[in-house]
Image (cartoon, grey):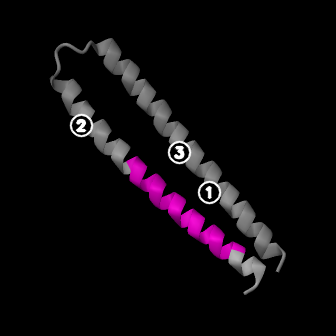
Amino acid sequence: MDAKQLVKQMLDFNKTAFDNNFNSMKALQEQTERLIGKFWEKSPIFPEEGKRAIADWMKAYKKGCDDFKNIVDDNFKKVEGYFNESK
């Protein structure tokens, strides 16, 4: 087996594993966010200022996750491009 083909298969496997793991973590985070959101709606103890602060934090978290995913995808493309060029 050619070394380049072996590396390409390893990259494909790692990209698939990363995508599956990332999507699972994102689904878990979204489910948790919905659950906590329902709790906040019914909680008279939690102040509005606290709700806004946590909502802002969640927006920043989602943006960070999306940015991280885009960076990882771009880097996988760069590495795949490198191996496609050197054929």
Instruction: Say if the magenta span includes residue 9.
Output: yes
- Mark 2 packing: few (<14 Cα in 10 Å), some, or many (20+)? few
Q: Mark 2 and mark 1: span between their CA atoms?
A: 30 Å
Where does the image place residue 14, in percent across and percent down from the top left? Answer: 59, 64
Specify the amino acid type for callout 3: Asp
Give, as a single range, the part of the protein colored magenta: 7-26
Q: Does residue 34 lie above or below 17 as drawn?
A: above
Camera-side residue of 6 and 51: 6
| Magenta span dominant secondary structure | helix
- Tag count: 3
How far across and how far down the image is residue 36, in percent?
26, 32
Looking at the picture, does residue 28 appear above or below residue 38?
Answer: below
| Image position, residue 34 (x, y; %) | 27, 38
Question: Upstream in the sequence, badge 3 or badge 1?
Answer: 3
Question: Where, quadrant-wise, is the N terminus in this rendering?
Answer: bottom right
Q: Secondary structure at mark 2?
A: helix
Q: Give me the disc on residue 35.
A: 2
Q: Which mark is residue 66?
A: 3
Q: Which residue is mark 1?
A: 73
Q: What whole-number distance in Å separates the C-alpha atoms at marks 3 and 2?
A: 21 Å
Q: Quadrant of residue 58?
A: top left
Query: Residue placed at 48% from the left, 34% from the top?
Result: 61
